[in-house]
Amino acid sequence: MKKFSILILSFYIISSAALGQHAFISEFQFGSFDNIDLNSALKTNIGSGVAHFSASDFGPGGVLYAINDWDNGFYTIDTIDGATTLLGTNPPPEDHVWTGMAYDEETGIMYGISYHDVTQDFYSSLYSLDVTDGSYTLIGSQTIAPAITSIGIDGLGDMYAMQLGNPCKLYKLNKATGAVNGYPGIIGHWASGQRHGMDWCPQTEAMYITTDVEFGNSNTLRTIDLTNANTTVVGDLGAANWTATIAVVPILSADFTVSTTDLCIGGTVDFTDESMWAISWSWTFEGGTPATSTDQNPVVTYNTPGIYDVTLEVSNGATTNTLYIEDMITVRDIPVQPDTPEGPTEACGYGDYIYTTTDVLWAETYLWEVLPVDAGTITGSGISADFEASEDWTGAYTIKVMASNACGGSIWSSELNCSLAFGPAPFFVEEGGSYCEGDPGVEVILDGSELNVDYELFLEGVTTGIILAGTGNPLNFGYQTDEGLYSVTGFTSECSTLMISEAWIYPIYPPTAASLPTGPVEVCSGTITDYQTGSIPDATELVWNLSPSGAGVINGSGENITTEWSLDYNGLAYLSVFGTNDCGPGPTSDELEINVSLTPQPEISGETLVCNDHEYIYSTDENPGSTYNWEVVGGNIVSGSGTSEISIVWTTIGAATLFVTETINDLCEGTSDTLDITVDDCTAIEMLNNDRFGVYPNPAKNQITISINSNKAKRYDLNIYNQHGQRVYEVELHHNGGNGKHQINVASYPIGLYFVRIATSAKEVFQSKFEVVK
């Protein structure tokens, strides 16, 4: 029996030899029986028996079975000395010959293969074989691979077949129907007879074949790639010895399962053998009855508590394999009586208390009990439990504990005798908070109390000396000014209870003075600028002021704000800030003086319909201290640069533009709208009121007359513009010669100056101006 400790399960396997890398072959002509090393093809003779074996494989229990090609006998072969035993004679169907066999470890079925070799009517048939006497049951036949000489089953349970011919071919067979369901490829040599073998080695994970050579008497051992049928020669098996079979030695392995690994005294465990290729079993059961067994599936009883090993040794008649599992079986007893609980023997109502006991052997859980149940509740399943005392019950009570596991429970421990006294009920400590310097402080209030209970006020765990008797109503401990956490304890002569929550009391002070705001002191109207101030101790909010009120608008709060200056404000403005909290505002900062200058808004006056290579005057309002930057596209400034009035000669025919940027005191600037100019290619410009054209009256109130005196018939374009360059009238005139007049109603025109422009079809231009008055 092992020491009682944490269960650690371990196992190891003992194997006599790695015989899975060996195989047995039977020489066809003379019956020589050999052991062959699959790594080198080296043969070791075992003995000599019956000749003419055409197929063999290991079957259930690691027994080697074989079929004789001449007498159709079904044999077992002793792998120790090669001796054979006839189990039965079962000829294949008429005109068939046995050529191969393979055992499926997963299903426990032994398969046999034959082919029909009369005239040209070839076909192969797959059978299941009864290993007790060699009798067979047809599974199915097919003609795609009509002359199969050997079969083998790989580690995945798939069946492969080698087809005779020149060259040989590898096929995949359906075990359920015998039909071909795969063609990996051509093997690469040719065979004219059925003297070939095939078998899978699980240890090397390779399919091995034995082959004869075209019209020769030599044999080779090869591995075959099941994906493409390529073969690799392992070695030469020698001349004059046709090898028609190969049977790879199965890997003997011990294995088993159990019905349980954890049981109570007197319980049983069912052991189920899961070994591979075993024919005998030797069990050893530490602590069990029986202690040993040779049954394949024994049942063992355990009557003594402990942790025990199990060993299984199996044999296939030639080798052995051992599986040893340490500390596999745990046998439990009912736990013993726990010790008397330990913990407080005097308790108070509303209290929580911990009771413990020592751990006992085999215990999985612990059951705690308090009596009477009115004394409170106890919870826990381990060696400690939490007792929550009743709020309204007093008197003697006991605590006891029981240990248990799946096998049962112990007897109760001895009782721990305790007593429960009245404990003050918990109430909430209310209020707390801040107070302003100079105020009386903050009240500490208990939201309830009990008669015959005294209540003491503490600050940071130290008594304040204030004790109030309970009245059955809330208690007020008065105003407190010392900063910290206040708590209250209710107590009697026997018990005390810490009241719920604490009151935090602390003073706050008015904010200190704010620092002078920082930011631009020269700004332009209509712009937005940023201003800042430093943090203000004790302030919960910052308040900004801007005067006069019409200077702009403050946006934002805190230490950083923006000011949006009014578009039309010009002059000094003042910005200040102060902090505030629940105790009121603090001192206001010094004022930041800010000079706000107007942002200019220039407008251009001048003609918009002009002739190229002619000079025109354009202007905007002149303001003291301003500079002017004109931008011209399509013409050249000939005078007045930097002033409010310039002269331009237009040089580009078509569209041109003009705008001006005005800057005041090198700070504030504004840009006019762009003035669009139309430049004509004027061949000649003459003033009206000559011998050909006239405009009258000037000034005019109601209408003007345009007179035309020409001997030639012509077309004229007549346009009138206001002083802003906007066209207010246009007409196309056709003159047939002589004197003509054209009258225009100007009564609805606003008073002001107007420009008349007449262009002929010969690109002559005449212009004048008149004034409208009321």
Image (tube, rainbow, N blue to C red):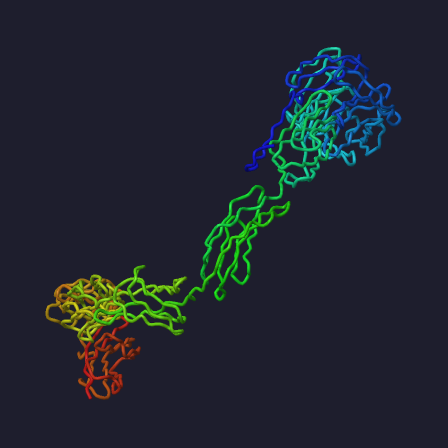
Residue 147's spot in the image, x, y percent? 79, 26
Is residue 113 among what the camera can see? yes
Is residue 764 among what the camera can see? no
Q: How many marks?
A: 0
Tell me which corner region of the image, top left, top right, bottom left or bottom right, holds residue 744. bottom left
Taking the image as shown, residue 680 lies to the left or right of residue 472, namely left
Taking depth in this image into account, of 635 and 179 the one nearest to the observer is 179
Taking depth in this image into account, of 25 and 244 the one nearest to the observer is 25
Residue 467's spot in the image, x, y percent? 32, 67
Taking depth in this image into account, of 526 and 38 the one nearest to the observer is 38
Taking the image as shown, residue 340 lies to the left or right of residue 491, namely right
Give the residue furthest to the left: 624
Residue 345's spot in the image, x, y percent? 47, 55
Compared with residue 408, is residue 742 higher up or lower down, i.e. above or below? below
Residue plotted at (53% across, 56% down): 398
Residue plotted at (54% across, 57% down): 370
Taking the image as shown, residue 21 lies to the left or right of residue 478, namely right
Residue plotted at (21% across, 88% down): 701
Tell me which corner region of the image, top left, top right, bottom left or bottom right, holds residue 77. top right
Taking depth in this image into account, of 553 and 650 the one nearest to the observer is 553
Q: Quadrant of the C terminus?
A: bottom left
Q: Quadrant of the N terminus?
A: top right
Residue 722's spot in the image, x, y percent? 23, 78
